[in-house]
Amino acid sequence: MRWPEVLRSKYEWSDSGPKANRGQVTVIETLNNDYGGHLWVADHEDLFTGVVRCWIVTLAITPLYRGQGLGSRLIQHATSIARARGAKSVGLNVSKSNKEAKSLYSTFGFSEARSTMMLNL
């Protein structure tokens, strides 16, 4: 499955991509035109402080291509986008159980800033 179909099916994507909040998508495509992963960044304004951050909406690498440094390259790309936009920080959400991703993010200096509470129904 090529990457546009993956994004359309998984994220209800349109051909024009994200427009809200200066969204920008970077897609990793293999030499065989297979989807390898993607980075989606957008601006996020804190409702209480008005501070605008660059937000990593999704960062995904397919299992076949993990461990090859692609996630690191996408994080570096996200921070470059944030700096170019004048953002003072980059934020993201990560599952508490995703130890590999949390370890990767911490090597770049990400630290836990808040937690999310859930109620299972």
Image: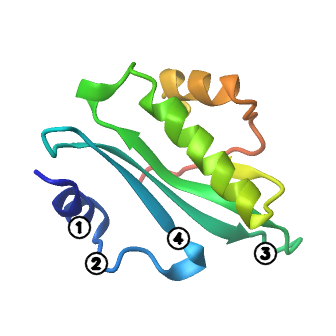
Relative side of 39 to 106, left or right? left
Q: Which residue is mark 4?
A: 23
Structural distance between the alpha carbons of marks 4 and 1: 16 Å
The answer to which of marks 2 and 3 sits earlier in the sequence is 2
Structural distance between the alpha carbons of marks 1 and 3: 29 Å
Amino acid type indicated by mark 1: Arg
Q: Residues within 10 Å of mark 1 (few under 14, many from 20)?
A: few
- In the rendered view, tell whether residue 91 sits above or below residue 17: above
Q: Residues within 10 Å of mark 2 (few under 14, many from 20)?
A: few
The answer to which of marks 2 and 4 sits earlier in the sequence is 2
Q: Are marks 1 and 2 in contact (CB under 8 Å)?
A: yes
Structural distance between the alpha carbons of marks 2 and 4: 13 Å
Structural distance between the alpha carbons of marks 3 and 4: 18 Å
Relative side of 38 to 62, left or right? right
- In the rendered view, tell whether residue 69 sits above or below residue 89: above
Q: Which residue is mark 1?
A: 8
Q: Which residue is mark 3?
A: 47
Amino acid type indicated by mark 2: Ser
The answer to which of marks 4 and 1 sits earlier in the sequence is 1
Residue 120 placed where, x, y %? 45, 49
The answer to which of marks 1 and 2 sits earlier in the sequence is 1
Relative side of 46 to 120, left or right? right
Residue 25 placed where, x, y %? 44, 61
Residue 116 showing in the rendered view: no
The answer to which of marks 3 and 4 sits earlier in the sequence is 4
